[in-house]
Image (cartoon, helix red, strand yellow):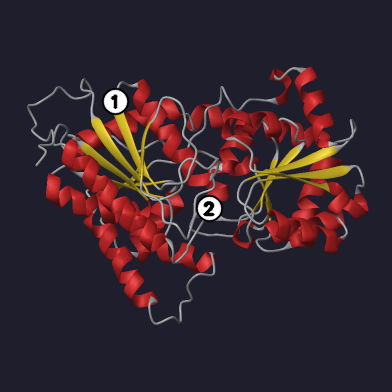
Amino acid sequence: MNKSLNQKDSVAPGNCSYRVLMIAPTSFFADYGCHVRILEEARALQRLGHRMTIVTYRNGRDLPGLDIRRTLPIPWRQHYEVGSSRHKIVFDALLGLKALQVMASERFDIIHAHLHEGALIGQMLGRIFGPPVLFDFQGSLTEEMIDHRFLRRTSLIYPLLRRLETWIDHSSGLIFTSSSNAERILLQDFGCDVDLIRPLPDCVDTGQFRPRATFSERTMTEMRDGLGLPADAKVIVYLGLLAEYQGTGHLLRAMQQIRAARPDVYLLLMGFPGVDYYQQMADTLGVRDRVLFTGRVPYEHAAQYLALGTVAVAPKLSLTEGAGKLLNYMAMGLPTVAFDTPVAREYLGSAGVYAERGSAESLAGKLLSLFHDVDRARRLGETLRLRAQEQYEWGNAALKIVEAYEVLLGIRPRQEAVVRLPVPQE
């Protein structure tokens, strides 16, 4: 049985290289959402000298410089798992077995578990092998299932899943939340102890995601030509999953009104899955000639695609999940319209433009307002870029993660650790 590093006198605080097992119950890496958080946390920690091993599903894209261990495949499910699915039960069982195999053969100081499934696996392994568990919480498990229309509140299984979720939350040594709104959910809805929770907002690499002016005009021209964008087109950019809880249908309906008012406006809709479904919807709505579907955009190319944008949009409907795409938009200096949710307000602050949640008409109106008032749009974009640089850099977040590790290892007294990031200012 492996012995974890959990003695107070074993290392000086902040001067040790930790072995960290990250459990990622998803098809890492898949160029969206929680995958970006996992990737950037791992990279930032590696830059500080820590050794990261990521255990994840069979599917996914390998990335240079990361130690990724994958599960065995299941023959009847070859494609990516996005969101809730009954097949994830098998994927998670295989993930648990793979993590068990890795921990039985190697020593780790910390288990850093993402999502509730990862936290459940991590807590079981922690009890067997000893390392403490940090739970990286990115939204309510049951609320996500409801958002994905996989579960109903009236279902007989809902109370059981809710109790399981509560147990996972309360059993974790420390919990990182991707937003202050997520912290409120844990405190108010699940009754967690405030001392267990450390808000660690999603962050962004502001060197990679940067304003359009920093890209060569030749690159931008080649990309526009390749996509078939007219030289004088005004472009709305969206990058993320395509799904109803992401507001994709509302966005296409908003394009009906935008197209009627401004024929020079195009929507660059970047993401997956469901491309065929939403292409058909765009045809039905009569906006197919103004909506360009790229499918999956590799994360390393995302900034170039976003640089084509005049404004950005984030019509996510979920009230509990994070919204990391907002940070990419902010770092690009793009004025951004979002549905009015607590997470959107937390990230964008007073520089965001907010549409009535669930209203395609409001969304269209807010987007059009930025095309009509170019000076306001420019000022908002500059403010968002500065906000990202000052409050949401991954380098600062990595230091907070290490402080939390040292609390769990007993190297730092819990009351001494200053783990919370500054509260974002409006």
Instruction: Find residue 11 and report its horizontal and vertical position in percent.
Output: 13, 24
Q: Earlier in the sequence, mark 1 or mark 2?
A: 1
- Helix, strand or loop status at disc 1: loop
Compared to residue 370, the image places residue 83 above or below, namely: below
The image quadrant where one finds the C terminus is top right
Instruction: Name the foreground residue: 171 vs 21.
Output: 21
Q: Residue at x 48, y 76 (%)?
A: 152
Of tags 1 and 2, which is closer to the observer? 2
Residue 416 visible to the viewer:
no
- State the image quarter where residue 361 is shown: bottom right
Instruction: Find residue 28 and report its horizontal and vertical position in percent.
Output: 45, 43
The image quadrant where one finds the N terminus is top left
The residue tagged 2 is 79
Q: Residue at x 35, y 28 (%)?
A: 45
Compared to residue 338, the image places residue 153 above or below, namely: below
Q: Is residue 74 left or right of residue 78?
A: left
Q: CA distance from mark 1 to mark 2?
A: 32 Å
The residue tagged 1 is 50
Compared to residue 11, the image places residue 82 above or below, namely: below
- The three-letter amino acid code for the residue at tag 2 is His
Instruction: Find residue 42 and report its horizontal and vertical position in percent.
Output: 38, 32
Instruction: Name the foreground residue: 27 vs 263.
Output: 27
Residue 98 visible to the viewer:
yes
- Helix, strand or loop status at disc 2: loop
Q: Crowding near pointer 2: few (<14 within 10 Å), some, many (20+)? A: few
- The three-letter amino acid code for the residue at tag 1 is His
Q: Residue at x 68, y 60 (%)?
A: 356
Q: Crowding near pointer 1: few (<14 within 10 Å), some, many (20+)? A: some
Q: Are marks 1 and 2 in contact (CB under 8 Å)?
A: no
Q: Residue at x 56, y 26 (%)?
A: 206
Instruction: Find residue 184 and report its horizontal and vertical position in percent.
Output: 40, 56
Instruction: Name the foreground residue: 320 vs 280.
Output: 280
